[in-house]
């Protein structure tokens, strides 16, 4: 299996539009004004050298890299570029599973995956002008992780033979699907590396972290992954809207009105798919983020029900501190 990932995708698309900026640090985020509140969507490699990364506040990015060029997010342009990339991959012939704008899995037959990876990189570059990296693995997990070692603009193979050599001594959150929270819980159990997690008894971890989660974590640390590559069209599992406010919201009646408004906008965005759960996101001052959700009695598309669910989720927030960002996410029935 191969995993194709576009290098610094949003920044690379912007460089095609603004070739005069090549070699300069570029930050894409918000409306492109670092004096306003917003976060970094993508930073070019030149900007990353200054510690600028996705999710960083734009103002912080400007302090870290004052010479950076800030550009606004242009969703339509990125979607068009992504469509070209995926068309180039599908034209090669294999099953393609799209993960998002800038990455996809491919299932290939053949004895020379490195040659196939090089050909895929060439085709994407020829069709779009964009560079990509390719990871090769026995399964999707290995291929996905391998890509990170091939970046930028390279190819890397991760297999059962070199799995522990490459990943064994790395922290558990180096694995796909394991975040900081889970890594922290594992650390509390004395499991701080991929190798130690792989050596853990699945039954023991099941007793600590749950009958499904525990064994899954051990399998992941061992490089095991059973899901096939599927050509089924990518379908978003949720839909959301969020707003970063240029002034803090310290009146929670206003917060409630904003959540209701965002919920109505989300409801207006969805199609016939039914929503099973609504999640509200609150980012307090200075930069603490919390989420709470509300599961609907039964999946629905009713706008009033979605608004009421969002307000109910907001009611679970006990802190009434000033707010800088609000978001509402509708999670679809599966």
Image (spheres, helix red, strand yellow):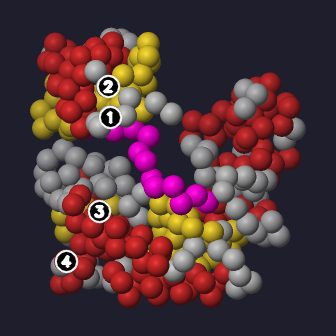
Badge 4 crowding class, 10 Å Cα cut-off, few under 14, some 14 to 19, many 20 or more, is: few
Mark number for residue 301?
A: 2
Q: Is residue 122 shown above or below 88?
A: below
Name the mark nearer the viewer: 4 or 2: 2
How far from the left and from the top, in percent, is residue 157?
Answer: 68, 74
Give me the residue at 33% from left, 61% from top: 42
Mark number for residue 288?
A: none
Give me the residue at 35% from left, 49% from top: 55
Q: Give the mark nearer the N terminus: 4 vs 2.
A: 4
Badge 1 crowding class, 10 Å Cα cut-off, few under 14, some 14 to 19, many 20 or more, is: few
Badge 3 crowding class, 10 Å Cα cut-off, few under 14, some 14 to 19, many 20 or more, is: some
- Residue placed under numbered mark 1 in the picture: 272
Horizontally, is 105 left or right of 14 in the view? right
Name the mark nearer the viewer: 3 or 2: 2
- Residue placed under numbered mark 3 in the picture: 79
- Find out whether the residues at labels 1 and 2 contact each other: C-beta distance under 8 Å: yes
Which SS does the magenta portion mostly show?
loop
Label 2 element class:
loop
- Find out whether the residues at labels 3 and 2 contact each other: C-beta distance under 8 Å: no
- Residue placed under numbered mark 4 in the picture: 17
How far separated are the C-alphas under marks 1 and 2? 7 Å
Horizontally, is 190 left or right of 145 in the view? right
Magenta stretch bounds: 229-242
Horizontally, is 260 left or right of 107 in the view? left
Residue 33 image-quadrant placement? bottom left
Give me the residue at 80% from left, 65% from top: 160
How far from the left and from the top, in percent, is residue 83?
Answer: 34, 68
Label 1 element class:
loop
Residue 326 or 212: which is nearer the viewer?
212
- Find out whether the residues at labels 1 and 4 contact each other: C-beta distance under 8 Å: no
Q: Give the mark nearer the N terminus: 3 vs 4.
A: 4
Residue 327 image-quadrant placement? top left
């Amino acid at each position: 299996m191969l995993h194709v990932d576009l290098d610094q995708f949003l920044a690379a698309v912007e460089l095609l539009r603004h070739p005069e900026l090549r070699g300069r640090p570029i930050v894409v985020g918000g409306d492109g004004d670092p004096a306003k509140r917003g976060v970094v969507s993508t930073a070019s490699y030149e900007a990353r050298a200054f510690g600028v990364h996705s999710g960083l506040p734009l103002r912080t990015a400007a302090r870290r890299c004052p010479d950076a060029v800030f550009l606004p997010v242009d969703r339509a342009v990125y979607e068009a570029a992504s469509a070209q990339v995926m068309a180039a991959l599908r034209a090669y012939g294999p099953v393609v599973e799209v993960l998002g704008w800038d990455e996809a899995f491919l299932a290939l037959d053949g004895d020379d995956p490195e040659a196939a990876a090089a050909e895929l990189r060439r085709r994407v570059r020829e069709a779009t002008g964009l560079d990509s990296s390719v990871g090769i693995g026995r399964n999707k997990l290995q291929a996905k992780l391998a890509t990170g070692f091939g970046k930028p603009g390279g190819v890397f193979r991760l297999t059962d033979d070199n799995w522990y050599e490459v990943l064994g001594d790395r922290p558990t959150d180096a694995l796909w699907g394991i975040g900081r929270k889970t890594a922290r819980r594992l650390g509390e159990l004395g499991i701080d590396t991929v190798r130690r997690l792989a050596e853990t008894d699945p039954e023991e971890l099941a007793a600590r972290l749950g009958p499904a989660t525990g064994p899954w974590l051990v399998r992941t640390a061992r490089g095991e992954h059973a899901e096939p590559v599927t050509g089924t069209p990518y379908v978003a599992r949720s839909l959301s809207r969020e707003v970063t406010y240029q002034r803090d919201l310290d009146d929670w009646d206003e917060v409630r009105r904003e959540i209701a408004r965002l919920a109505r906008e989300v409801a207006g965005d969805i199609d016939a798919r039914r929503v099973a759960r609504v999640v509200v996101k609150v980012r307090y001052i200075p930069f603490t983020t919390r989420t709470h959700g509300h599961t609907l009695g039964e999946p629905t598309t009713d706008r009033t029900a979605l608004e009421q669910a969002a307000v109910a989720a907001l009611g679970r927030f006990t802190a009434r501190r000033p707010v800088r960002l609000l978001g509402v996410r509708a999670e679809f029935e599966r």
